[in-house]
Amino acid sequence: MFEKIKIFFEELETDSLESKKDVLEDILSLAKEEGLIEIDKGKKVDDLKIVQTKYFGKKGIISDLMKYMGKVSNKDKPILGKIIHNFKTTLEDKLNQRFTVLKKTEINAKLETEKIDITLPGTNSQRGHKHPLTLVEEQIKEIFTNIGFTVVEGFEIEEDYYNFERLNIPKDHPAREMQDTFYLNEDVVLRTHTSPVQARIMDKMCPQLPVKIIAPGKVFRRDDDSTHSPMFHQIEGLMVDKNITFADLKGVLLHLVKSIFGEERKIRLRPSYFPFTEPSAEVDVSCGNCNQEGCRVCGYTGWLEILGSGMVHPSVLEMAGYNSNEVTGFAFGIGIERIAMLKYGIDDMRLLFDNDLRFLEQF
Ligand code: DAH
């Protein structure tokens, strides 16, 4: 195209443009057709920009044509101007039109791909749930509150006096060796059991009757293996009133065991020793794994030990101010970990404290 125009003007020389304007018009009308086709072919804004540069750029056809304006005679200038103007505006109009269309399509396509569907469900954050120890503690609390017990709390940091002396365990008593104690100082310990709550609640209540409480909480001992943890949980139970007997204790514990493990389970009370109860009994539940046939879980005995209990020792009642000739009571201490392990078939206590979600998610 450049070439044809160049030749035209070379040949024009001194001739007037007027007589040969048809020839130039033909050349340009061809160029125009070509341009219009190129514009139509452009499928993207960028394609169109290339065409735009070809015709309207600094070195484009139109600026090339303009150079001849200075070369033709004054008379010819308006003629050439008109021809160029016609050529230019046709292409310009077509380009603008096409730019508008393509820009719109591109924006629409972009909007389409970047569209946010607000009706889609969001990504849910994982829902937490209760720890197996919490589940067991809550269940036991519910069982006892349903039969009139009140839930109370004691202190994790406890006086030696309440942790031991008030429970009939004086300083040199061999029973202190049953519990590996964390001493904070000579008189203050991390409580080794929830039993001190017995003494504290009786101090508070005396002379009122009945005393009917359970006390859940953390306890601490210097122990750490697959069945012991230095921190674990107990629930203490205490009932003091007139005419409380061992049969009441047995009835309450049987109700507890059946509620947790199922109606078909049985309990067995074995004579035992605790300084703060007399008589004392260790309580076993019939093994649910083997139906008492004997298996690894119950050590082939058919029974699983679950708690300690007994009738409140007269001195423990007396130290609180109750007359042990008139009132009696029973007490028990349940290990929550032990119950959770039996209930859910967990064989290593440390799993309860590792907080591995793969483990915890199962409950
Ligand atoms: N305090 C005892 C312990 O931690 C458990 C216990 C036994 C609590 C007998 C009692 C009880 O209330 O009567 O080993």
Image (cartoon, helix red, strand yellow):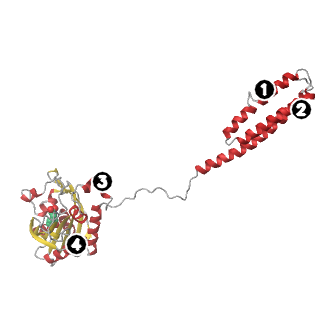
Q: Residue at x 39, y 59 (%)?
A: 127
Where does label 3 land, which residue?
356
- Horizontal side, residue 293 vs residue 81: left or right: left
Tell me how far mark 2 sits from mark 1, CA to CA.
18 Å
Amino acid carrying mark 3 in the image: Asp
Q: Quarter-wise, where is residue 88 in the image? A: top right
Q: Residue at x 73, y 30 (%)?
A: 57
Of callouts 4 and 1, the N-terminal one? 1
Amino acid carrying mark 1 in the image: Glu
Tell me how far mark 3 sits from mark 2, CA to CA.
91 Å
Q: Residues within 10 Å of mark 3 (few under 14, many from 20)?
A: few
Residue 256's disc number: 4
- Is there a contact, CB below 8 Å, between mark 4 and mark 1? no
For label 1, the SS is helix
- Is there a contact, CB below 8 Å, between mark 3 and mark 4? no
- Horizontal side, residue 257 vs residue 84: left or right: left
Q: Residues within 10 Å of mark 4 (few under 14, many from 20)?
A: some
Where does label 1 land, which residue?
3
Q: Residue 255: percent from the left, percent from the top? A: 22, 75
For label 4, the SS is helix
Image label count: 4
Would you say residue 318 is visible in this rendering? yes
Tell me how far mark 4 sits from mark 1, CA to CA.
106 Å
Q: Nearer the viewer, residue 47 or 120?
A: 47
- Is there a contact, CB below 8 Å, between mark 3 and mark 2? no
Amino acid carrying mark 2 in the image: Asp
Would you say residue 313 is visible in this rendering? no
Q: Quarter-wise, where is residue 92 in the image? A: top right
Q: Residue 362: percent from the left, percent from the top? A: 31, 60
Q: Is residue 284 above or below residue 42?
A: below
Tell me how far mark 1 sits from mark 3, CA to CA.
81 Å
